[in-house]
Image (cartoon, helix red, strand yellow):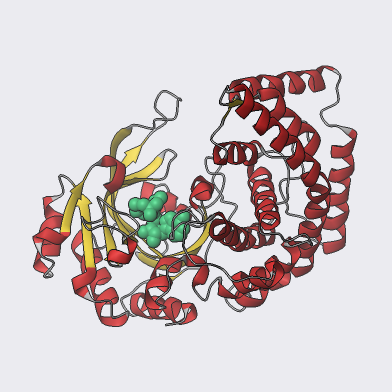
Amino acid sequence: MRSTDIRTTFFDFFTSRGHTRVPSSPLIPDDPTLLLANAGMNQFKPYFLGEVSPPYPRATSVQKCARTSDIDNVGRTTRHATFFEMLGNFSFGDYFKADAIAYAWELLTEHYRLDPGRLWITVYRDDDEAMDLWRRLGVPADRIQRLGMDDNFWSMGVPGPCGPSSEICYDRGPAFGPAGGPEANGERYLEIWNLVFMQNLRGEGDGKGDFPIVGELPNRSIDTGLGLDRIAAILQGVDTVCETDLLAPTLAAVESLAGRRFPGRDGSDASVSFQVVTEHARSTAFLIADGVLPSNEGRGYVLRRLMRRAIRHARALGIEVPVLTTVTGSVIDNLAADWPELEAQRSLIEAVTSREEEAFGTTLRQGTRLLDAAISRAHTSGTGRLPGETAFELHDTYGFPIDLTIEAAQAAGLAVDSDRYAALLDEQRRRAKNTGKGKTAAAMRRQDTYREILAQHGRTDFVGYTDTTADT
Ligand code: ATP
Ligand code: MG
Ligand code: MG
Ligand code: MG
């Protein structure tokens, strides 16, 4: 089943069951506590909280999601992307657990025709009711696992609605690892759908980010998320999200630039690099289309990290020509029919990616040489650490985001002296503030370039270029 049909089947199923179809919200959320949209429920948060009365009791959507927290997993697991589409059905104080579970089961087994014998379920450890509901649908007890807070209690990661959840996983068989259910092996037992029984509220807490549960929501609600990439991988019989029809044309573009084939999920560096370039191309295109521009802070930094990481991995594959504009172009070609904003912002995406690649491409080689030399020095001296000074110089002079340096150091079996790095960065920021110059001359020029690009491409609602920290 093609991904377009997977979306349509989902919408048909839920609209015929009284759900109002709601468009995806932009990746830049209307919520100051959240950097980027990371789940279908984000735009409905005020309804769950009871702050705003919902215009419909049930909704369904396909939401654009960004999860930078999964960046290191890309290409290392088969299932994580930094951008993905989440299909969801929602109830705002209307139906609850029993219907949510029955809907999901019916859609998966009768419409997507997944073999029920391969489906595994996880429930929150104390949730006897969910356990019982699954049993009544015919799921045997030995394919239902009870898990704790970490796995089966869903929260936004910021203050807001939360609740126990139940996840549906698909057993991809021994080729993906040993048996034991989702608790033992998240790669073999691919989590496809998370059903959240929204009934609790997390508050600000002590301000240190632990967001304790502070009470019950006014109404019990339903929030679900089915990962399109993952169900597409299953229905299309491919191993990784990059091989689904959502990304296959982009993977093919990377293959043709590299002059060699994707080796599959063989755990090799090349395999990871192919997937990083392919996957980051998609998140890059969607972020720019939604108004993010590269900078050294916030969302702009997320975008810059993704682009620079993609470029570095392209070089690792031996691609010496500019790559970002080509691969993001293939994302647009492939996905614009479903996401018209990509086509509408094509020239902007081209301009931003080629500008960023120009800026980073010229320093990448020198930076890589410096990095390699520092790595071999650390090996010879046996410290096991890359000095903070090196990480700082790489950032300051060569534009290496710190996590690129950390990633390269880790690959060489080294840690980075991050404390020293942070101290140097701090010192530089303070100096810049004192002299009244928040930015280097190069950063000012770069900012002007992005302003020009924007003026040419006619968008006014962009974020990311107004950062106030010292740029590199
Ligand atoms: P995992 O345990 O595999 O990291 P999760 O529990 O963090 O997934 P949820 O927060 O429950 O994921 O999100 C709902 C659904 O969105 C998941 O069941 C999955 O299908 C999909 N999903 C989550 N994270 C990603 C990702 N990084 N890339 C692609 N799809 C994802
Ligand atoms: Mg996760
Ligand atoms: Mg999970
Ligand atoms: Mg989950």
Q: Is residue 373 above or below residue 254?
A: above
Closer to the camera in the image, 164 or 2: 2
Q: Is residue 79 left or right of residue 397?
A: left
- Residue furthest out toward the front: 380
Q: Is residue 123 left or right of residue 172?
A: left
Closer to the camera in the image, 178 or 226: 178
Q: Is residue 199 visible?
A: no
Q: Is residue 180 left or right of residue 79?
A: left
Q: Quadrant of the C terminus?
A: top right
Q: Is residue 256 left or right of residue 48?
A: right
Query: Which residue is depicted at the point 56% across and 26% down?
Result: 384
Where residue 133 appears, as percent x and y from the top left, is 13, 62
Query: Which residue is depicted at the point 15% across and 44% down?
Result: 126
Where residue 92 appears, as percent x and y from the top left, is 33, 58
Q: Quadrant of residue 405?
A: top right
Q: Is residue 102 above or below residue 400?
A: below
Where residue 109 appears, as percent x and y from the top left, is 25, 77
Where residue 396 appears, as percent x and y from the top left, is 77, 32
Closer to the camera in the image, 316 or 157: 316
Query: Which residue is depicted at the point 11% across and 51% down?
Result: 128
Query: Which residue is depicted at the point 47% across and 68% down?
Result: 22
